[in-house]
Amino acid sequence: MTMNIQIRTARLEDITQLALLFDAYRVFYRKESDPGAAAVYLTQRIQAGDSEIYVAIREGQLSGFTQLYPLFSSTRLQRMWLLNDLFVSPAHRGKGISKELLQASRDLCQQTGAAGLLLETEKTNQTGNHLYPSQGFRPCEQSNFYWWEPGY
């Protein structure tokens, strides 16, 4: 663990601070700010246990988080994890927090016997597109990624 950074599973008592980070993450991806809805969403995830949320604590504050969802691979006959969200507060960037959160994600993958981690980021996310390969992630060259949504 990097000096002065603690990574742990999110708890309900984290919701107030975590919702603000989650809201900032959503705003980064051009969604309207709604900390209340963020708090409800995160509370539901923690209570249902349908995602794994890790928080980074630095100087007594939640400074970042990652959220992973379980997936299953029929061809691999194994669980996989979707690393869906990763965010570090701008005031705490450059301190190794993203790397620590990614390590917690890899640890979860190994602890659960999962086939691997899947993540996506926008092509314009220069920081992420440099970070992920530096941490052992590689682009999937053999598959295309497609998206569908109602009304699209």
Image: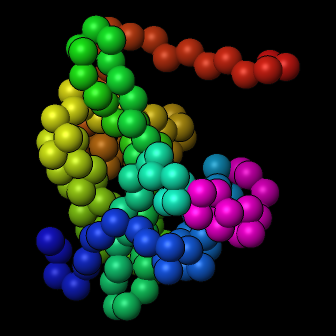
Q: Give the residue at x 21% y 27%.
A: 115
Q: Is residue 1 left or right of residue 50?
A: left
Instruction: Please name whichever residue, 20 or 41, is drawn nearer the observer in this view of the structure.
Output: 41
Instruction: Please name whichever residue, 117 or 108, is drawn nearer the observer in this view of the structure.
Output: 108
Image: magenta residue range: 30-44
Exactly how many numbered labels are in the figure?
0
Residue 87 can be seen in this image: yes
Residue that lies at the very extreme toward the front in this rendered image: 48
Q: Give the residue at x 22% y 85%.
A: 4
Q: Answer above or below: position of 84 versus 100.
A: above
Q: Is residue 61 left or right of residue 26?
A: left
Q: Point out residue 17 in the picture as x, y percentages from the top left corner.
A: 55, 79
Q: Answer above or below: position of 29 versus 143.
A: below
Instruction: Please name whichever residue, 16 or 56, is drawn nearer the observer in this view of the structure.
Output: 16
Q: Point out residue 148 in the picture as x, y percentages from the top left corner.
A: 67, 17
Q: Main secondary structure of the magenta part?
A: helix
Q: Point out residue 144 in the picture as x, y percentages from the top left corner.
A: 45, 11
Q: Is residue 1 left or right of residue 83?
A: left
Q: Give the residue at x 58% y 64%.
A: 43
Residue 39 lies within the magenta run: yes
Residue 64 lies within the magenta run: no
Q: Point out residue 40 in the picture as x, y percentages from the top left corner.
A: 68, 63
Q: Quadrant of residue 141?
A: top left
* Image quadrant occupied by the N terminus: bottom left
Q: Answer above or below: position of 53 versus 123.
A: below
Q: Is residue 20 left or right of residue 133?
A: right
Instruction: Please name whichever residue, 62 or 49, is drawn nearer the observer in this view of the structure.
Output: 49
What kind of colouring is applied to the model shown?
rainbow
* Image quadrant occupied by the C terminus: top right
Q: Answer above or below: position of 67 versus 13.
A: above
Q: Give the residue at x 39% y 29%.
A: 71
